[in-house]
Image (cartoon, helix red, strand yellow):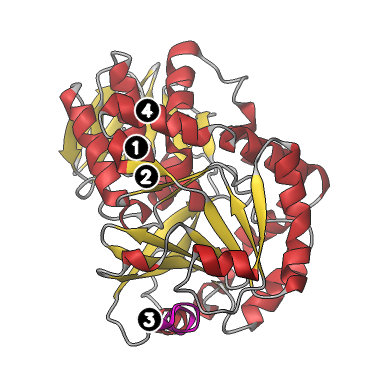
Amino acid sequence: MIGAGIIGTSAAFALAERGYKVTLYDRAEPGRTGPSWGNAGHVVGSGIFPLAEPGIAWSGLKMLLDPDAPLKVPPAYYAAIAPWLWRFWQSSRGDAYARSLAALTALSLGSVDETEDLWARAGIGALMRRDPALYLYESDQSYQMSLGHWDQRGEVGLRSTHLDARDIAELEPNLAPIFARGVVSHEWGIVTDPFEVVTGLFLAGQARGVLHERAKVDAIAPQGDLVTVTANGGARTFDAALVAAGVWSKTLAQSLGEPLPVEAERGYNLTYPGRAGLVGRPLVLADRGVVVTGLEPGLRLGGWTELGGIDLPPNPSRWKRMRAITDAVLPDLEGAPASEWMGHRPSMPDSVPVISRSGRSPAVYYAVGHGHYGLSQSARTARMIVELVSEVADAQHAPFGIGRFA
């Protein structure tokens, strides 16, 4: 198994539970190098909408031109990202969008329950609590524009409660009085610390026999019904290999000659140590494209994105603009010290992760491309991987197959 983030450690634990012998490769300490380290800490059961929605071409262009918008593409990366953006736009249209919406709905419904169940079996159930999220709108107009999404969530059984400005002030007294409307989304959880979760799953896997090798995997190659994994210059043969290396999975797929259009969303966040108590629940600042969460490391503001690959340095102006948001939304934080972080979310153009057997080798599997929802979808992904490996459930999980990109 290649990749020891939240997806890899979840799958390793679930496979070991079923009696499989698992060797887990990663180039660094589990959970240290990807979004499993610094994400917002949400387990979201209502994340059913693809990023590529109808009309995204126009709204995306407006965001790219707006310096305060949550999405950016560095000019140096325009040429490299163009093919991915073409697929992204194609995914926003007609039947393609409907298929993505259906797949994400299937992946999301009941995911908080499934996370609780997996983590309880791993002995880390105390690291998550159920906590509905509060979506905040700064104008009645933006709230009205969101109602179509809330209606669609309701149609599939996802519960919500709508609030006015007085309700918001009672629930979150430390917020600036700038929010006209709010919606509570009930199918959510929040963790103590995302890195603590990955560490807990990793240790639970080790207790069930999972082996760990700190090594960079350079290639995978079919050997009949088996697969060879080359790491740090040495090759070993396994019955099967699972690629769960986030944005670094693309080069491994290329070593098999297989298209895997995973792109790096460079996510930025700020964490204010010791200030987690300023908010009572997960907050989604819907008009600003960021979330606010109280975690053990501190109050975390995150969500802004650049489609900029894995090689460009971070853009400090993103953190500066995020600080301006916290100053406006939580006045008590003005001037407070904060740590800065940037990580690479692995994102597919249709927002649907690849949870699939390879089309080039029956001994290779993928679990990659979860975008903003790796923590949320990790338990269900682990279960699906076990089903693919042990029950040959390829047809059952076809909407997540890599073959859709062939």
Question: Is the C-beta separation of discs 2 and 1 under 8 Å?
Answer: yes
Q: Nearer the viewer, residue 107 or 160?
A: 160
In whole angstroms, how far apart are the C-alphas of marks 1 and 4?
Answer: 14 Å
Q: Earlier in the sequence, mark 2 or mark 1?
A: 1
Q: Position of residue 184 (x, y in %)?
A: 60, 53
In the picture of the structure, the residue carrying the numbered disc 4 is 118
Q: Nearer the viewer, residue 72 or 214?
A: 72
Q: Which mark is residue 47?
A: none
In the picture of the structure, the residue carrying the numbered disc 3 is 332
Identity of the amino acid at label 4? Answer: Leu
Decide if residue 104 is in sight here.
yes
In whole angstroms, how far apart are the C-alphas of marks 4 and 2?
Answer: 21 Å
Q: Is residue 149 left or right of residue 80?
A: right
* Quadrant of the rendered image containing residue 157: top right
Report helix, strand or loop for mark 2.
loop
Q: Position of residue 358 (x, y in %)?
A: 50, 29
Report helix, strand or loop for mark 1.
helix
Neighbours of disc 4 within 10 Å: few (<14), some (14-19), many (20+): many
In whole angstroms, how far apart are the C-alphas of marks 1 and 3?
Answer: 38 Å
In the picture of the structure, the residue carrying the numbered disc 2 is 245
In the picture of the structure, the residue carrying the numbered disc 1 is 8
Q: Earlier in the sequence, mark 3 or mark 2?
A: 2
Q: Is residue 348 left or right of residue 320?
A: right
Overall secondary structure of the magenta section:
helix
Q: Is residue 166 left or right of residue 221?
A: right
Q: How many marks?
A: 4
Question: Is the C-beta separation of discs 3 and 2 under 8 Å?
Answer: no
Identity of the amino acid at label 1? Answer: Gly
Q: Residue furthest bottom?
A: 335
Against 341, is 252 above or below? above
